[in-house]
Amino acid sequence: MSNRTRARVRRAPRLSLDLRAALGLCGTLLKYLSLASLFPAAIAVGYGEPVWPFLGAGAIAAAAGLLLERLGRGAGIAGFREGFFVVAVTWLLAAAFGSLPYLLSGEQQLDRPIDALFETMSGFTTTGASVLTDIEALDQSLLMWRQFTHWLGGMGIIVLALAVLPRLRVGGRQLLESEMPGPETDDLPARVRTTAQRMWLLYVALTAMQALILTLFGVVGLDDKMGWFEALSAAFATLPTGGFMPENRSFEGFAAVSQWVTIVFMAIAGANFALWYRAIVRRSPLLPFRDEELRLYLAIIAGASIVLTAVVWGEGLVGGGESAVRAGVFQVVSIMTTTGFGSVDFAAWPALAAMTLVMLMLIGGSAGSTGGAIKVVRHLLVGRILRRELRQTVHPEEVMPIRLNGLAVDERTLRAVIAFVLLYIGLFAAGAGVIAVDTALQGPELSVLDAIASSATTLGNVGPSFGVAGPMGSFESYSDVSTATMFVLMWAGRLELIPVLVLLTRRYWRA
């Protein structure tokens, strides 16, 4: 290449971020999201509670959305580059909007903006961590709003918009991929809106199914504590793998049959939704079990359940027999799928059980699920990469492609997997370090495991930690610095790091 050609290449125009288009699209999404306030408003009417906090929040969000939308009028269409900005910023806008009902209601436990933002980000990111110390003291409408933020966030605010808005025709697939975390090796249908609609239909159907089953248990007397409100709340938190419940003791007070049904739905939610959809379309119930990630996912659940059941049974923590098995299986499935329900206070369990649960916090659910953390498929691929490196150390000339479900995974995907895992571990360690230092200075008093678990549970969108923030506890006693740190961890973890970290690079804004 000549010097003149090189100069022309260097002077070639570079694509830049269309900030107006990105902000306009954020405004559109916020405008439609504001309609969500009508559901808790209807609940408030039914219970004779104040309606104006929800209507006021919806009006403020709609006005802000229209203003941003107007700002983006006449701009280009959001593409791949703008997609990172839209995904990351929309979640922040959602958290700001979702916190308004708490602040406007005058609820004393959420009267500080940082606490209201934490609770809302925990809801929309399906984390389930809470700063509330007396959940049952909230109005029924506020309790249902907490649950509804889970449900909206489960398959992603952006996916919801893709299902109802015709606007996203360029850049839509990139947005969808950011909202369905994990490396996909088998493409979904090409039309993004069609894909989003199908996933939402399945999501809605499973939610309705669980709610109806649990309500029926209450009607026939199998679970006297399970009314329609509790059943709907549980379904709104289970399918998005959230963890909020309108009870101070989470799932502890509900009957065994309700807990077993919830275990099944948590396991379904933690697996790849595309597998369930294909099984239904092709009328082949066994089709999902050909997937290597699903098999490993179920194997980890089975192995960890055996370990925890043995610990619980052997220590006599909840008695023996079915109670011990149920406690072990429930907590394994709850933590690995990043749902975060508690059927017992596992914060008081021995070290082996605690370490097992922290490991499950880092593993997470499957790609294409509503779960968080690193994801099973990445662990699977990392294991195969390490195996290849060991074999090629002995046989350096051997060509050994990495395969998943019989298909070769390209090297670029493998590099991305390694990069993601390293970034995840780095951010997890940094978060744990900040929390450990801050709590040492300002309280509460935490052990090393408590600080590690606090970082792992928020970055992985799991929910409960150990110590004072266990499944029956709260993050209320953490200082503002730790609360803000966990807020960022929840946000970054839900978006799988990259959309957030990209915004922090100078090249993204300059190139």
Image (cartoon, rainbow, N blue to C red):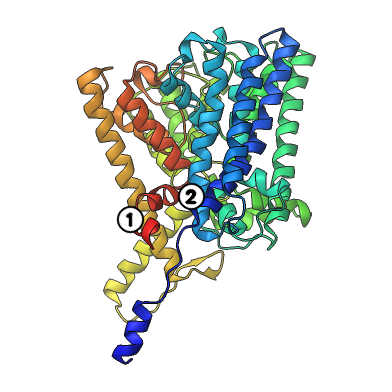
Q: In which quarter of the image is the N terminus?
A: bottom left
Q: Quadrant of residue 509?
A: bottom left
Q: Which mark is residue 214?
A: none
Give the vertical position of 152 relative to 102 (above or below). Answer: below
> Which amino acid, by three-letter code, is at mark 1?
Arg
**In this rendering, would 113 be left or right of 90?**
left
Give the vertical position of 258 relative to 409 (above or below). Answer: above
> Which SS class for mark 1?
helix
Give the vertical position of 172 relative to 314 (above or below). Answer: below
> Which amino acid, by three-letter code, is at mark 2?
Phe
Question: Pointer 1: residues within 10 angstroms few (<14), some, or many (20+)?
Answer: few
Spatial separation of the CA atoms under disc 2 and disc 1: 14 Å
Residue 385 visible here: yes
Closer to us: 19 or 493: 19
Give the vertical position of 334 relative to 499 (above or below). Answer: above
**Residue 265, x across and y down, in percent:** 64, 35
Q: Residue 85 carries which label?
A: 2
The residue depicted at 45 percent of the width and 65 percent of the height is: 413
User: Outermost residue, bottom direction?
Assistant: 2
Residue 250 visible here: no
**In this rendering, would 457 be left or right of 193?**
left
**Residue 508, x across and y down, in percent:** 39, 57
**Residue 28, x across and y down, in percent:** 63, 43
Report the number of discs.
2
The residue depicted at 61 percent of the width and 50 percent of the height is: 73
The residue depicted at 51 percent of the width and 27 percent of the height is: 120
**In this rendering, would 48 be left or right of 75?**
right
> Which SS class for mark 2?
helix
- The residue singled out by tag 1 in the image is 506
The residue depicted at 42 percent of the width and 64 percent of the height is: 414
**In this rendering, would 149 be left or right of 308?**
right
Closer to us: 166 or 275: 166
